[in-house]
Image (spheres, helix red, strand yellow):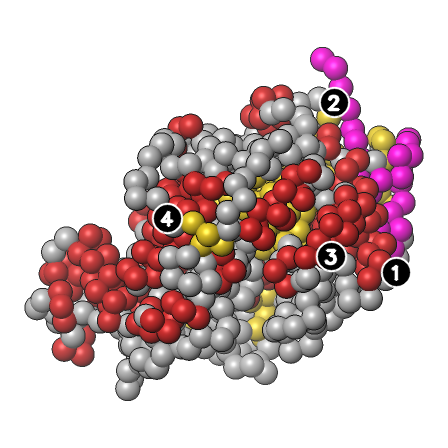
Amino acid sequence: MFTLGAFTEIRPPAVVAGFCEPSQKLGLLGAATRTTHVNEAEAAVTATSRTPARALGLDVDGLVFGCDYNPEQWDSSVWADDVRLMQQAGINLVAINIFGWSQVEPRDGSFQFGDLDRIIALLTEAGIGINLGTGTSSPPPWLTTAHPEILPTAADETRRWPGGRQAWCPSSPVFREKAIRLVTVTAERYGSHPGVKLWHVSNELGCHNAHCYCDESAAAFRRWLRSRYGDIEALNAAWGTTFWSQHYAEWDEILPPRTTLSLANSAQQLDFDRFSSDELLSYYRAEAEAVRRFSSVPVTTNFMVTAHIKTQDYWTWADDMDVIANDHYLDHRLPVPGRELSFAADVTRGIAGGQPWLLMESSTSAVNWQPINHAKSAGQLKRDSLTHLARGADGVCFFQWRASVRGAEKFHSALLPHSGTGSRIWSEVVELGSIMGRLSEIVGTAVTSDIAFVFSWESWWATDLDAHPSSDLRYLDQVHALYAALLDVGATVDVVAPGAPLDGYRLVVVPTLYLVSDDDAAVINEFVAGGGHAVVTFFSGIVDETDGIRLGGYPGAFREMLGVTVDEFYPLGAADVLTLTDGSTSTLWSENLSLTAATSIAEYASGPLSGVPAVTRNDHGQGVGWYLATELAPDALSGLLRRIVVEASAREFVELAPGVEVVRRRGADRDYVFILNHTDQPVAHPFAGQELLSEAAVTTTGTVDAGGVHIIRQEHEKP
């Protein structure tokens, strides 16, 4: 057995040695192995090259079923009982020390690992793997008291104080120095411990402190700009500083986009968003490097691919992660929260290059931070968890193990709720653990699709800036609308970054890609010219990467491929509804569009643009480009996308009933078809094979209960 010394207080080492080169890391999903689209042959190779009993390159048997555990919140007398109950629930990976800084380093430079030693020993002896946090997500009071300059500053230059979490500036050299010292000491102590299966850097980086406007951040922003532009006149050109007398003569004149009396420079705001994402990524890299000096265990952090966080461009973070991990919680402020769950899972799989990923955090029931925190209905815990699994996750974890009795998260649900093991939630947790334990054969299989769905954090940032034709137009609303329509028609999509290779796809869907570089737009245009199909929606291709308008008419970068030109936007009021000549309706947006090569599919039948095309189709090269110049009503949008998907001959297209998802994970010798019934009625399906949850054979058709799930194993036919 691996043992640690009995002492409880140590000092940091003077010398750091034994750096592990990136090529030595376990489970690395680097650029050389990450692909954007996995076709059937590639999926088979991927599946056969993995060790079936290992998920995500971790030394953990089968699918990961895990949780966060905060033993520091509880008397040590309950720790052994907690570990016993974890075994009963089927937990095989536990995240600890996520918020452990003030326990591990209660005074500057004085480290006390006794409690952490004991909980690590308990988990290891029980055969439960450890996802070891670096403990740096929130600084302890001694640090912010001694160094208040590390506290983040808002755009109006008011300081944000301790008392919550993440009260630190990402650019603060003092914070980095103290944090990396803690990481180094922790990694040296536990880097070769056999119980540690994964390293967890910080926690939800940028959840609260992504943007800091202090003087230290301003200096870091200027360094970032110098690296990006080289010459200050290049920056002036990119930012259009001839407008409003903003020309910069020296780098030191540049500030972050602090609160102004009028509208701010949009290019400055956009670059500050880029800088802020990069600054947090550089912080992650610093922690990860400190860990890798002492450990060859995979290192990651938990992303927040979700509707309410947009500050990190995770396409640029992906190659630095040994495992792609995401936190996701249902957002009941959205009309249909479950659709966003599916979208977030698909985005996370896209970030992972089509490979399996880890759901690092989710909730068993209600959260604590929404205006109304809805409890999950009976069976929803299982269905939501298996939806993530269907869409490529090789593990499902929860915040947290035991529900807190104090603090801001005391009403957040947990695996072990306040009411204990006699609760409905506990029984559903044990059931889910049993299911996860039985599904190890799914490990390493991949979701495949013929449809690419372009999603861009940069376009999200740029679209939602001020001084646009309509403040009601929001990027994510349009993304969700297109995705929901594809769900309605039974289509599975691969979410890809702008500029990602489109080889092997039949259709690319491009919702409101307002900002796109010439090179990234060319990938889509060439895909269509070469025989692919594309559907592009309004307010796309308008500006380049500097937020500069493309002249000659909208939709700018896609004008030739779509065979249309637009000379003016006609945004609609909240109550305005237009009728189209095909009988459908639209809202939000319209455009004065002229045909240059395209064919009109539907025109406006009402409003100031009566008779003007609203939906067009263009034969371009060997392919087809569709343009939607208005926001179609959901039924009309679904109907049109059904037509487009069929015309593009996309194979991953299975339409059962609204509210029922069908997703296929493909392996070397067999497929796994997930049928997820989010409705209150039973639904029949045509998939024959072995149903893994009930262990019953389905010979011709099956029926999924209301709110239920089927997972059908289908053997490949022998050649």
Between marks 3 and 1 in the image, the one whose residue lies nearer the viewer:
3
Q: CA distance from mark 4 to mark 1?
A: 46 Å
Q: Going by the picture, which residue comes out furthest to the bottom?
A: 261
Between discs 4 and 2, the one toward the N terminus: 4
Rendered residue at 83%/36% (across/down): 692
Among the 4 quarters of the image, the one containing residue 407:
bottom right
Between discs 3 and 2, the one toward the N terminus: 3
Mark 3 is on which residue type?
Val
Residue 12 is tagged as 4
Mark 1 nearby-residue class (10 Å; few <14, some 14–19, many ≥20)? few
Q: Residues in magenta?
A: 693-719
Residue 422 is tagged as 1
Rendered residue at 30%/40% (across/down): 15
Q: How far across and how far down the image is residue 242, in percent?
A: 14, 72
Mark 2 is on which residue type?
His
**Which secondary structure, mark 2?**
loop
- Is the C terminus in the top left, top right, bottom left or bottom right quadrant? top right
Q: How far across and how far down the image is residue 47, in percent?
A: 62, 26
Q: Which residue is mark 3?
A: 78
Answer whether labels 4 and 1 touch (C-beta < 8 Å).
no
Q: Is residue 681 above or below residue 319?
A: below
Q: Is residue 513 above or below residue 286?
A: below
Which of the two residues, 61 or 385, is positioned nearer the viewer here?
Answer: 61
Kindly tell me whether residue 145 is visible in this rendering. Answer: yes
Among the 4 quarters of the image, the one containing residue 311:
bottom left
Between marks 4 and 1 in the image, the one whose residue lies nearer the viewer:
4
